[in-house]
Image: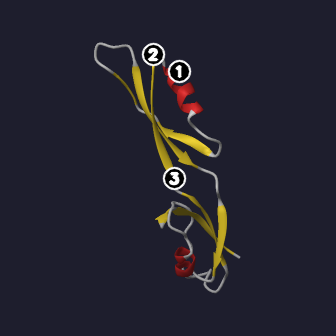
Amino acid sequence: MVRGAGIVVGAGPYAGDMLIGVIRPVESKTHTVQAEELDEIQDLLAAETPEGWQLASAPVAMAKKDTILIAEGTIVRRNGVQEIEADDMAALEAKVPDGYQLLSVRAV
């Protein structure tokens, strides 16, 4: 399980309430592209980014004595959000499948 930076509910005022957690898959891919202009780099990386994913980083380097730019773009999955329910935080965390991140928790 990967823990997110969302709201974490512990004991206290929420004790005894049903907890609902929002989870999503944690997945990333890396694509290396080459071009002569930064705009071209952006276009090439956009073409490699499927729906539901977004570009997280794309450091660019230029080879010595060359005009070709090389970028290694990392895209991350942002779709596939689901809700899970449990009676307490430990049970909720136990329900987060491998490869998923707990984004937030609310009590109902």
Residue 8 coordinates in the image, percent (x, y):
54, 69
Q: Give the CA distance from mark 3 to mark 1.
A: 25 Å
Q: Give the CA distance from mark 1 to mark 2.
A: 7 Å
Q: Residues within 10 Å of mark 2 (few under 14, many from 20)?
A: few
Determine which residue is flagged by label 2: 36
Residue at the location (28% across, 17% down)?
64
User: Do residues under tags 1 and 2 come within 8 Å of each other at their CB atoms?
Assistant: yes
> Residue 59 sits in which quadrant?
top left
- Count up the numbered dots: 3
Residue at the location (67% across, 80% down)?
18
Residue 50 coordinates in the image, percent (x, y):
61, 41
Circle 2: element type: loop
* Residue type marked 1: Glu
* Residue type marked 3: Glu
Determine which residue is flagged by label 3: 27
Determine which residue is flagged by label 1: 40
Circle 1: element type: helix
Relative depth, front residue between 5 and 94: 94
* Residue type marked 2: Glu
Could you tell which of marks 3 and 2 lies nearer the N-terminus? 3
- Figure check: 39 above or below 30: above
Q: Along the horizontal axis of the image, is 73 left or right of 106?
A: left
Residue 93 coordinates in the image, percent (x, y):
53, 74
